[in-house]
Image (cartoon, rainbow, N blue to C red):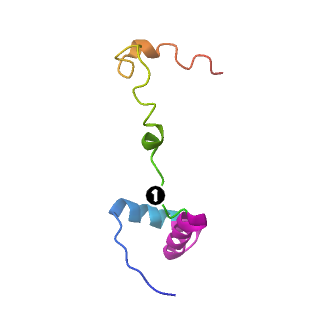
């Protein structure tokens, strides 16, 4: 087995340590499994983002309120049908 050195942001390193502790496995094993999962079945290609997959839909709806994302009036009653 060969060795590789990687630099991790502090927060990611902390999350890795916490996850490894919770799972009761060494951090290197957790990293190795994550890399294997990413590369499994030829998935070593970059996955397109949701925006890239739906780019043709963005801006395709005309009409509707211009302030839909900012106006609380448009959200009144939203989710009321949920039990």
Residue at the spot 39% in from the left edge and 16% down from the top edge: 72
68 left or right, relative to 37: left
Tell me residue 10's x, y (percent). Answer: 33, 63
Q: In which quarter of the image is residue 14?
A: bottom left
In the foreground, 79 or 54:
54
In the foreground, 59 or 18:
59
Question: 10 Å neighbourhood of mark 1: few (<14), some, or many (≥20)?
Answer: few
Range of the magenta residues? Answer: 20-42
Depicted 6 relative to depicted 2: above or below: above
Residue at the spot of label 1: 46
Residue at the spot 36% in from the left edge and 16% down from the top edge: 71
Tell me residue 38's x, y (percent). Answer: 53, 64
Tell me residue 17's x, y (percent). Answer: 46, 67
Q: Residue furthest bottom?
A: 1
Q: What element carries label 1?
A: loop
Residue at the spot 38% in from the left edge and 13% down from the top edge: 65
Depicted 61 relative to depicted 24: above or below: above
Instruction: Indicate yes or no whether the magenta region holds residue 47.
Output: no
Image mark count: 1
Q: In which quarter of the image is residue 33?
A: bottom right
In the foreground, 55 or 19:
55
Instruction: Indicate yes or no whether the magenta region holds residue 22.
Output: yes
Depicted 40 relative to depicted 56: above or below: below
Look at the magenta stretch and give its main secondary structure: helix
Point out the image quarter for the C terminus: top right
């Amino acid at each position: 087995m060969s060795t590789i050195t990687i630099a991790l942001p502090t927060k990611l390193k902390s999350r890795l340590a916490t996850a490894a502790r919770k799972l009761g496995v060494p951090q290197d094993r957790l990293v190795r499994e994550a890399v294997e999962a990413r590369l499994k079945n030829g998935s070593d290609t970059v996955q397109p983002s949701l925006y890239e997959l739906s780019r043709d839909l963005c801006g395709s709806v005309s009409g509707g309120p211009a302030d839909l994302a900012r106006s609380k009036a448009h959200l009144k009653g939203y989710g009321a049908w949920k039990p």
